[in-house]
Amino acid sequence: MSLIHRAVRGAAWNVATSLVARVVSVIATLVITRYLSPDEYGEALGSILLVQVCLTLSQMGLPQYLLARPDSGPRVVFHIAFYTNLACVVALAVVHLIRARVGPFFSLHELGRYLPWLTVTTFGESLAVVPERLLYRDLRFRVVALARAAADLGFSVTALALARAGQGGMALVYGGLLRVLLRLLVYSLQIDWRASIRPCALRWSTTREIFRFGLPLSVSVVAGSLSVRWDNMVTSRYFGAATMGVYNLAYSLSEVPVVNVGEQIGDVLLPSFARLPPDARRAALSRSMALIGLIVFPLAVGLAAVSPTLVEALFDPKWSRVAPMLSVLAVIAVTRPISYLVISYLQVSARVVVVSVLEVTKVAILFTLMTLAAPSGMMAVCAAVGTAFLYHALVGLFVVTRDGLPFWGTLLRVGRPLLSTAPMAAAVFGARWALAAAGLRAPWIRVVVEISGGAVVYVGAASLLAGDTARELISLTRAAARRQRGAD
């Protein structure tokens, strides 16, 4: 029970701090879009995503070894840090060599302008990976949560100020550099370097052990990264940087429930799963999916329902195309938390080959469907993205049920919170129709009424359709609050 409570408290810290930082980030992004055109935003963002693939490739699945094997010593930590940072340098060098070819291919004509600064930022992110995993391994969730929140806040303030000062897309690049420097500063002060990492001669036995774990996993990590980042590059390839900028903004908004709730909880559960025996791990997986669904599903479906009114209230008219894309892409937030938990469970169960197959298949389906849908326009592309993520969630759920969890029973347990969102969405649409009939045009008032009405209906629906999960969530929250008061 102590481990469960620590996981719940860690998840609470991750979610709370991430939400605060994300709210500030969203507000900053909304203001930044008033100073940047879709083309400027898309050029900078595409360059960032292109360079970040170097970070993803260079990790080779090795940092996850520290979470799946929490008893790893300083010698292992040094090996992982050495190989990942060396690989990052090599990958960045390759990008510099091919920049004249790869930029025009993805309609990124300003890549050369951004690349030097992005190289420094990406290497800094590589340096931060191992310290962050060490903190997670030691269940120091609060430190990581506060560091991430402070770094995200620093990015938001800096990028906004520079965009307002006329720096264009460079505002995002400079803000990203400050963000990674802040994280590195906090981690360097919190890690006991002598106890955690010990420079030593490289050993073949250690190298073979970590790569035997990491390389199969790296396939899934790279595929997962491609699925959530390089859909932007496909969009830029077929529709140009400006449309990609609009698509990315819609995608980023759709991710708010995923990144700030679902995956924050998942980051806590991965090291927690690793410390549980197999039977308890399976039970924890089923419970976790239902609990996360109860929180994330209404956020995702609600975001899709209110998207037309929300975009009208928040954005400059030049970004109006965000609304229809957001209404479709919000379905991703329904599927990704489930996928994230399934992948975490499979990783700590040492089934990295299965993880790799799932991720590679998802990427293949994603890019194939996007390519086939491109001639039909961006809305068809958005639907293709949602279809690929839905496939991944359902197949992943089927795979883990072979460990003893009933597929239909687990799907029903997860599905009840999702079913509770149907009355909520109906309430939002009804409120919008009633306000339009009454002649009320003020978008902010309409947003507040639509969200409030939907929230009230969802609470009632969830109490009826998913009452056991709701009661469990309330119980865990109260227990965590009591322990927090006791600790203080």
Image (cartoon, rainbow, N blue to C red):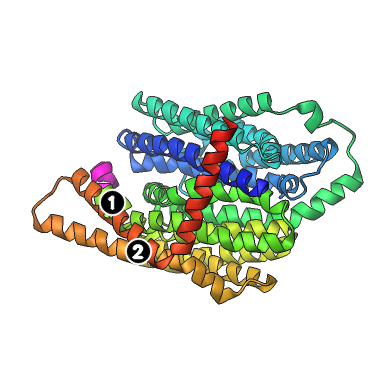
Magenta part of the chain: 311-320
Amino acid type, label 2:
Ala
Whether residue 29 is visible, yes or no, is: yes
Can you say whether 7 is above or below 114 in the image? Answer: below
Please tell me how crowded label 1 is: few (under 14), some (14-19), or many (20+) other residues with Cα within 10 Å: many
Can you say whether 243 is above or below 124 in the image? Answer: below
Write down the residue under mark 2.
Answer: 461
Write down the residue under mark 1.
Answer: 451
Can you say whether 470 is above or below 127 in the image? Answer: below
Q: Name the spot of residue 338 as percent of width and height, x first.
A: 54, 61
Residue depicted at x 52% and y 30%? 151
Q: Name the spot of residue 213 as percent of width and height, x first.
A: 78, 54
Please identify, in this view, whether the residue under mark 2 or under mark 1 is nearer the observer. Answer: 2
> Principal SS element in the magenta part?
helix
Residue depicted at x 32% and y 33%? 35
Left or right of residue 298: residue 436: left
Res. 36 image quadrant: top left
Q: Name the spot of residue 171 as percent of width and height, x first.
A: 43, 30
Left or right of residue 276: residue 106: left
Res. 145 image quadrant: top right
